């Protein structure tokens, strides 16, 4: 609990007051989630899946369009169902996989899981939101793998994916292709390549110990774009240098490491899978965001857990950690039972 | 949990932990390679990103006349500009174009909708930003029509042999004299802003310039609410004496496209920097400009300065120029010449004054002149062409150095000196004017009807000058006398001939530019036998020698050359280089450059012989029946020489010369060239009136007034 809370103190933006507020809000959410017995979630698993599907279908028909993507539902304020969808899916798959764990080696049940996953994925994909699609696929895929799959089935899955690829490729939206293109050939899109190049310069500019808090020239003079969200890692690297950045990375991985340990301690498969779901969510976002900052992965709009500016992202991460905390707090209860 | 599940769980968590550790290490490794291994290179790139050398403006040098009167100075002026990056950006989620609204409000504040002059000026500024093509496309695609004017633009082209040649290309340019509707202006502004945002640099785009202080503050107050609008300071060149010294001072304008590379090589980084395009502003551009300072500043991504890191170089103000020109004398010359042009209806004329001892120019008037302040508005090359088109008298043309004319009888100074120096005559040789002389035809020497007739101007008035020495010859400007000097006469005397005449022309500075410190000086070839054979495929005749000796035929010179040739007689035989700028002075009044008069070797004539040419000029003013008694000045002895030069402005349509009188006689240019005081000359004056008629009637009054003003009011 403490480690996750302390990781947030590198909120270097102008919005630090708001971010501080969200941090406190997140802390409260974390404690609340921790106090909540995760096992009650099992009851909510099926309704949550239907809620997710319902909202995604609603988005498809009556969603708001922003920047060329239909992702939002107007419920007084604009809501993006997929943000909550991550948790809904984690809960649902944790339930599904743990419920049928003894039968999952049968292809039918595995296929059931895959189909249940593909339904929301397709809806998210056509919004279009590639980042979220991949995130959801990664989390659920991890859960399925961790729950245990036969090698044979993995091969089958890979083969099916390979067969579907040409079909999928045709449906890739222009902007997705462009991002991949920019990654492979930075000269092709000057604007996006510029962002990445500036991120690299910022990181390199940090050196061993960095330029000091709020002293990064790339950051201060706005050469770095979306520096308080997507590229906050570059800010950290420029201002805290190699030493500080490794420390920050260490903290992030420590959080994930602890989550994996919690999963090991979990008293039941449902709790274990929920914790792994949370861990894989944090890991995936960290991996993609840091990878993008270090220019080893293409540019996506993915934020760095706990560190990027953004209230809902921070609070939802805290809730996720709270859930895991709920699992670890209850792992001993069984011993008394 | 059954056993298998537990086993799987352990294996899984090992795999998961290994993956985590591997990812962490991979990130650390990548970080190390970026921050430590390539750190130095990235730090350098970061420095390149944020550090910029900014030019700081250096005030342009001021131009003073010989008495310290300011002829050119810098007036503070303001520019209303928008910074594209600071303008509200258009939110694509709303139907409202926020940027357009902001620009609309700015135009309203500037009163472009109610004040046609404002609308015209804004369109002009936009024209400068966008150029001809873009301006036209923008206005027309916004649904507004433009009217056009045709001008001839000089364009640099490559000829068949790959050499660069200037070619006049007829070009349509938009007529900017009618105000555009607001919609058109708005389209132009949007276009300029769009172009400005293409570069990532943050650069103000001027919307309106030449705003005075009062108006600038007023607008600044009103635009306080408008995001992205700035009021900037920009000095404007001002010429208090307006068209009085237009041709001497010249004007400023944006760097001409044809010369862009040249200026760039000389360190002019901003292609819109105003540079001298004519007159002294052109010749002394580099001195007047000074050196812009350089500051190392930290800029953000929009190019906005956040702080000054280092002042690399303080701006070095341009040097001030001290001229030998006397603006009061200039005014006298200007007014006198203007009056004479008006009286005679002559299209243009020149009046020049110089100190013959050192070439210091005291005055230069070429009429028509122009108010060089209009160029401070800087509409650029295309509209300069338009100015010229508009006025067939070509006011931008400096006729004093850019026009070639037959010098007429003023050339007799050269023939007389040559004849004395070459011993064709002695000062005491007498020749007789008995009326027209006839040169026998080369092929039919015995047929008098085929002989060529040569008359002197006095024969038309039924006057014969009789027996003369060189002094009377000059004083009466007798043509017969000079025909003999130039070509001799069969069985009677040997004249100078083409080669000796050409030699002395060159000695007096003909055939070469005078080197005055103004741009645009032209020269003509000295006509000699070879020249005639090459250009006309004819051989030189005695008749050619006759015509050359009286400054007709193929002899051509600029008024400035006539002035210099007069100075040669006045100063005892030295060609001097005319020069306006005598000193370049810095802001601390330290003289940084002093003109060393360029005085040629004495032409090879004995001063005692040259004295007779001087006497001839004295005689013209002061002797019996002299040609120019009207140029006398109280208390001062003036020496002078008139010229009435027949000229032919050939018109291919009528296959003849224009402006013949009813008897078929050709029109005349009026010349007068003089110096004073006779004993110790300190000023030479040359007056030229194109198609002015008799030199004595038209040109002399201008010279007389100039000399009178000099000796009675202005002389230091």
Image (tube, rainbow, N blue to C red):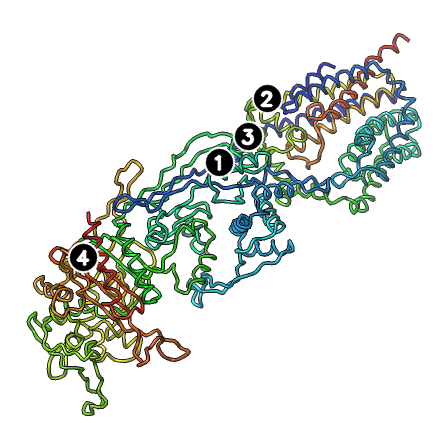
- Asked if residue A330 is positioned above or below residue A63 in the image, the reply reads above
Between residues B267 and A7, which one lies in front from this camera angle? B267
Can you name the residue that lies furthest to the top here?
A: A336
Q: Earlier in the sequence, mark 3 or mark 4?
A: 3
- Asked if residue B608 is positioned above or below residue B501 in the image, the reply reads above
Distance from the alpha carbon under mark 3 to that under mark 1: 26 Å
Q: Earlier in the sequence, mark 3 or mark 1?
A: 3
- How many callouts does the rendering have? 4
Mark 4 element type: strand
Q: Which mark is residue B37?
A: 3
Chain under callout 1 = B
Distance from the alpha carbon under mark 3 to that under mark 4: 70 Å
Badge 3 crowding class, 10 Å Cα cut-off, few under 14, some 14 to 19, many 20 or more, is some
Front: mark 1 or 2: 1
* Residues at discs 3 and 4 in contact (Cβ within 8 Å): no
The residue wearing badge 1 is: B52
Between residues A283 and B148, which one lies in front from this camera angle? B148
Badge 1 crowding class, 10 Å Cα cut-off, few under 14, some 14 to 19, many 20 or more, is some
The residue wearing badge 2 is: A243
Between residues B480 and A272, which one lies in front from this camera angle? B480
- Residue drawn 65% across the image and 55% down it: B143
The residue wearing badge 4 is: B600
* Residues at discs 3 and 1 in contact (Cβ within 8 Å): no
Front: mark 2 or 3: 2
Do discs 2 and 3 belong to a common subunit? no
Between residues B169 and B142, which one lies in front from this camera angle? B142
Distance from the alpha carbon under mark 2 to that under mark 3: 14 Å
Q: Earlier in the sequence, mark 1 or mark 4?
A: 1
- Asked if residue A117 is positioned above or below residue A312 in the image, the reply reads below
Mark 2 element type: helix
**Is residue B673 found left or right of A104 in the rendered image?**
left
Q: Is residue B545 visible?
A: no
């Amino acid at each position: 609990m403490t480690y996750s809370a302390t990781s947030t103190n590198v909120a270097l933006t102008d919005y630090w007051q708001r971010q501080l507020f969200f941090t406190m809000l997140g802390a409260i959410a974390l404690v609340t989630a921790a106090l909540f017995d995760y096992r009650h979630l099992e009851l909510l698993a099926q309704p949550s899946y239907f809620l997710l599907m319902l909202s995604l279908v609603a988005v498809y028909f009556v969603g708001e369009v922003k920047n060329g993507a239909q992702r939002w539902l107007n419920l007084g304020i604009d809501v993006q169902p997929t943000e909550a969808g991550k948790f809904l899916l984690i809960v649902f798959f944790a339930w599904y996989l743990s419920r049928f764990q003894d039968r999952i080696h049968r292809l039918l049940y595995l296929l059931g899981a895959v189909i249940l996953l593909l339904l929301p994925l397709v809806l998210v994909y056509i919004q279009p939101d590639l980042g979220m699609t991949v995130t959801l696929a990664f989390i659920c895929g991890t859960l399925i793998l961790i729950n245990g799959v036969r090698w044979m089935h993995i091969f089958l899955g890979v083969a099916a994916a390979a067969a579907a690829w040409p079909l999928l490729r045709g449906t890739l939206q222009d902007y997705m292709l462009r991002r991949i293109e920019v990654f492979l050939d930075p000269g092709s899109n000057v604007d996006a390549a510029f962002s990445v190049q500036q991120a690299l310069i910022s990181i390199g500019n940090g050196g061993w110990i960095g330029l000091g808090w709020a002293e990064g020239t790339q950051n201060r003079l706005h050469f770095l774009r979306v520096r308080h969200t997507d590229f906050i890692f570059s800010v950290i690297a420029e201002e805290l240098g190699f030493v500080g950045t490794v420390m920050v990375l260490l903290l992030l991985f420590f959080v994930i490491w602890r989550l994996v340990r919690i999963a090991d301690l979990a008293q039941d498969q449902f709790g274990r899978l929920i914790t792994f779901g949370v861990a894989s969510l944090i890991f995936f976002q960290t991996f993609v965001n840091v990878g993008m900052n270090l220019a080893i992965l293409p540019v996506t709009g993915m934020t760095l857990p706990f560190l990027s500016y953004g209230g809902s992202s921070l609070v939802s991460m805290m809730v996720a950690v709270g859930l895991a905390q709920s699992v670890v707090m209850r792992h001993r209860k069984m011993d008394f039972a | 949990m059954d056993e298998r599940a537990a086993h799987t769980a352990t294996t899984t968590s090992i795999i998961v932990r290994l993956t985590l550790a591997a990812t962490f290490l991979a990130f650390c490794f990548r970080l190390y390679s970026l921050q430590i291994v390539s750190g130095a290179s990235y730090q350098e790139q970061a420095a390149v990103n944020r550090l910029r050398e900014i030019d700081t403006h250096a005030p342009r040098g001021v131009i003073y006349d010989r008495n310290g009167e300011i002829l050119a100075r810098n007036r503070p002026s303001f520019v209303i500009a928008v910074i594209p990056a600071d303008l509200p950006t258009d939110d694509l989620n709303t139907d409202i174009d926020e940027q357009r609204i902001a620009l609309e409000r700015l135009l309203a504040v500037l009163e472009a909708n109610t004040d046609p002059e404002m609308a015209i000026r804004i369109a002009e500024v936009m024209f400068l930003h966008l150029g001809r093509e873009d301006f036209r496309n923008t206005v027309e695609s916004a649904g507004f029509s433009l009217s056009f004017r045709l001008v001839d633009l000089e364009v640099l082209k490559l000829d068949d042999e790959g050499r660069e040649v200037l070619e006049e290309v007829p070009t349509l340019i938009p007529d900017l004299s009618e105000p555009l509707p607001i919609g058109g202006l708005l389209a132009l502004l949007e276009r300029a802003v769009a172009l400005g945002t293409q570069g990532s640099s943050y650069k103000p785009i001027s919307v309106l310039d030449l705003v005075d202080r009062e108006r600038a503050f007023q607008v600044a107050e009103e635009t306080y609410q408008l995001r992205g609008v700035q009021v900037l300071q920009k000095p404007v060149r001002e010429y208090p004496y307006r068209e009085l010294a237009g041709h001497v001072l010249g004007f400023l304008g944006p760097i001409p496209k044809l010369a862009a590379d040249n200026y760039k090589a000389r360190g002019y980084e901003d292609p819109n920097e105003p540079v001298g395009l004519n007159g002294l502003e052109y010749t002394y551009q580099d001195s007047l400009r000074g050196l812009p300072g350089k500051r190392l500043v930290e800029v953000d991504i929009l190019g906005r300065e956040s702080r000054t890191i280092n002042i690399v170089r303080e701006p070095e103000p341009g040097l001030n120029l001290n001229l030998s020109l006397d603006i009061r004398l200039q005014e006298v010359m200007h007014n006198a010449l203007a009056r004479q042009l008006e009286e005679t209806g002559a299209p243009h004329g020149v009046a020049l004054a110089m100190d013959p001892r050192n070439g210091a120019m005291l005055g230069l008037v070429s009429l028509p002149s122009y108010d060089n302040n209009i160029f401070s508005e800087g509409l650029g090359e295309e509209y300069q062409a338009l100015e010229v088109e508009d006025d067939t008298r070509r006011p931008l043309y400096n006729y004093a150095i850019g026009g070639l004319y037959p010098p007429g009888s003023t050339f007799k100074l050269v023939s007389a000196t040559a004849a004395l120096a070459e011993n064709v005559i002695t000062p005491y040789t007498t020749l007789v004017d008995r009326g027209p002389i006839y040169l026998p035809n080369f092929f039919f020497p015995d047929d008098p009807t085929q002989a060529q007739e040569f008359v002197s101007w006095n024969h038309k008035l039924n006057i014969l000058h009789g027996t003369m020495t060189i002094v009377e010859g000059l004083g009466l400007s007798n043509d017969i006398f000079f025909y003999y000097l130039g070509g001799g006469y069969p069985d009677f005397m040997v004249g100078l001939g083409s080669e000796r005449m050409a030699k002395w022309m060159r000695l007096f500075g003909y055939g070469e530019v005078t080197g005055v410190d103004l741009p645009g000086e032209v020269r003509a070839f000295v006509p000699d036998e070879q020249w005639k054979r090459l250009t006309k495929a004819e051989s030189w005749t005695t008749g050619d020698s006759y015509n050359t000796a009286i400054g007709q035929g193929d002899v051509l010179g600029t008024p400035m050359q006539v002035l210099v040739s007069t100075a040669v007689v006045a100063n005892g035989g030295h060609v001097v280089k005319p020069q306006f700028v005598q000193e370049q002075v810095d802001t601390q009044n330290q003289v940084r450059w002093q003109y060393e008069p360029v005085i040629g070797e004495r032409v090879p004539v004995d001063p005692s012989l040259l004295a007779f040419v001087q006497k001839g000029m004295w005689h013209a003013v002061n002797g019996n029946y002299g040609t120019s008694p009207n140029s006398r000045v109280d208390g001062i002895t003036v020496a002078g020489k008139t010229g009435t030069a027949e000229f032919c402005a050939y018109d291919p349509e009528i296959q003849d010369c224009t402006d013949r009188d009813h008897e078929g006689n050709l029109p005349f240019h009026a010349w007068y060239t003089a110096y004073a005081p006779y004993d110790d000359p300190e000023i030479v004056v040359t007056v030229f009136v194109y198609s002015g008629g008799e030199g004595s009637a038209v040109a002399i009054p201008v010279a007389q007034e100039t000399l009178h003003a000099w000796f009675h009011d202005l002389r230091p």
